[in-house]
Amino acid sequence: MPNDDSATPVVWGTIDSMPSLKPISGVTMWPATGTNMMINFVRIEPGAEVPLHHHPHEQGGTVIEGTILMTIDGETREMRAGDVYIAPPHAVHGATAGPEGCLVVDIFSPPREDYRIPSR
Amino acid sequence: MPNDDSATPVVWGTIDSMPSLKPISGVTMWPATGTNMMINFVRIEPGAEVPLHHHPHEQGGTVIEGTILMTIDGETREMRAGDVYIAPPHAVHGATAGPEGCLVVDIFSPPREDYRIPSR
């Protein structure tokens, strides 16, 4: 039974060929965008920082490679593969990559329009 | 500035200590649930299969370890770390783990009530 909603195609992506953004020094992002969710690969260079910020989108994430110090609502935890977080809308959060850098996945719901790449 | 919505606490989880489900033989899940999203670690034993199915939730995912053959709307692709998919609501999809098994992350928006673990 094929999907009958032609407005929402299947998304298939691979980090090696997806368009990227560099919104912050030492931070590269490869976002994939659906209807309710954006799945964003984020590579952070060793010691680079995503400053504390907040937004109305719920944000969750996990770690693929390396470690990250994640701060949400004033609490900081070191995360690695097998760890997960979900930060509620408007929660103040930020992150600093560990000494080897990291590749993490951030999920936004709804998608962040400011990270949407026009070509997809 | 603390998050002022006490109904949606920050979620922190680690696969080693999260409650799990085994909905299908060879498939173990560790779901973390927010408001708009569920982030679900899924370990699939070598060659084990998630049969074709569909649901009204949008589903996305990526791979942490190993490989998975993912089928969405009749198209099958081999996925590994660095790959991502987003399947629209109602898309028919299923998966088979590669020869070494896999650990993947599935994201559902909205969360799947049938995977929600009452204790969290």
Image (cartoon, coloured by chain):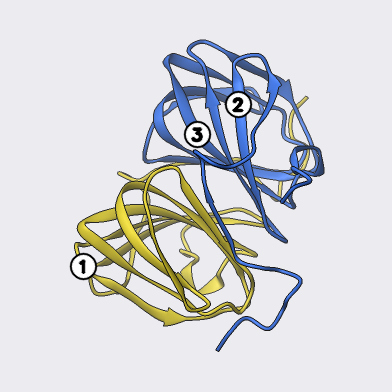
Chain colours: A yellow, B blue
Q: Nearer the viewer, residue A26 or A22?
A: A26
Q: x%, y% of residue A58?
A: 62, 67
Q: Residues within 10 Å of mark 3 (few under 14, many from 20)?
A: many
Residue carrying label 3: B104
The mark lying in front, picked from 3 and 1, is: 1
Residue at left offset 64%, top offset 74%: A89
Q: What percent of the width, then of the height, locates residue B1?
A: 55, 89
Residues at marks 3 and 2 on the same chain = yes
Q: Which residue is mark 2?
A: B28
- Labels 3, 1: one chain: no
Observer-nearest residue: B30 or A60? B30
Q: Circle 2 marks a residue in which chain?
A: B
Seen in the picture, residue A102 relative to A58 is either above or below; the reply is above
Could you tell me if residue A11 is visible in this image? no
Residue A65 appears in view? yes
Quarter residue B66 falls in: top left
Rendered location of residue B103, percent (x, y) = 47, 30
